[in-house]
Image (cartoon, rainbow, N blue to C red):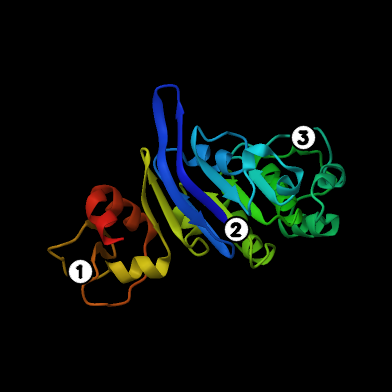
Amino acid sequence: MISIQNLSFSYGSKGVLKNITMELKGGNIYGLLGENGVGKTTLLTLLCGLKKPQTGTIDTDGRAPYDRQPGLLAEQFYLPDEVAPVRNRARQFGLETGRLWPKYEQAKFLSILREFEVDENQRMDKMSAGQLKKTWIAFALACNARHYFLDEPTNGLDIPSKSQFRKAITRYTAEDACIVISTHQVRDLEEIIDPIIILDKEDVLLNASLQQISEKLFFDYSNTLHANALYLEQTPAGAIQVYPNTTGGESKVNLEALFNAVHAHKDVVKALF
């Protein structure tokens, strides 16, 4: 489990995170959402130990990530948005770099590459952006880490590759793994991310499971307009509305509508949760 207590971080006079407190538990794929500049990437780099908390603490299974203890490093993987075009063939890269992770499996790496339709003998610095991203994703999954921090993993992937990613992230990670995925592409990942974390400037607007969200908010797809809608979007197929769930009804959460409703009525949503 990852415990974050009163975490703050700033770049000079620009505050990014302020007194953030939350717990991230194994067995979940967290969706980390937020507008540009609210600190999604900063939070991921703090969680993996690339940055040091300025105030507050991060405790990952009893260890502080910034201490860079080998035992913890071997159990986590951070995948940045922009991945390195390594001057090596994919197969050889796996053999050499995989030594840093005790649970790494070369056979698993090659198997996922085949599923991703990536040539294991191709040099990574000669790959397209999408092929390179898939190679790094395959390598990350082959490391069999306990904690994954993925920053915009579907950026650069075409539509079939996004489907391959969704299948791989659920198939090739352990049931007790803690996975945090930062994304703007909520439609790419809405079938697999749960719980949902929405960051705002120096604040956490929402940290809740889809079940908790559907208990508190109702997502209405009918053409009957609701007077208390926190968010309303007209589409060719009808309207999407979000309003407080006062009747206990069940509805399917729409992540884009949720995000817009949360930002339009921050205080109302925070009071609900």
- Residue tagged 2: 178
At mark 2, the secondary structure is strand
At label 2, counting other C-alpha atoms closer than 10 Å, the crowd grade (few under 14, some 14-19, many 20 or more) is many
Q: Along the horizontal axis of the image, is 11 left or right of 221? A: right
- Say if mark 2 contacts mark 1, CB within 8 Å: no
Q: Along the horizontal axis of the image, is 183 left or right of 144? A: left
- Residue tagged 3: 86
At label 1, counting other C-alpha atoms closer than 10 Å, the crowd grade (few under 14, some 14-19, many 20 or more) is few
Question: Which circle's residue, 3 or 2, is located before the other in the chain?
Answer: 3
Tell me which amino acid carries mark 1. Asn
Question: Which circle's residue, 3 or 1, is located before the other in the chain?
Answer: 3
For marks 2 and 1, give the CA distance: 39 Å
In which quadrant will I find the N terminus?
bottom right
Residue 73 visible to the viewer: yes
What mark, if any, has residue 185 been given in the picture? none
Above or below for 241 versus 70: below
Residue 33 visible to the viewer: no
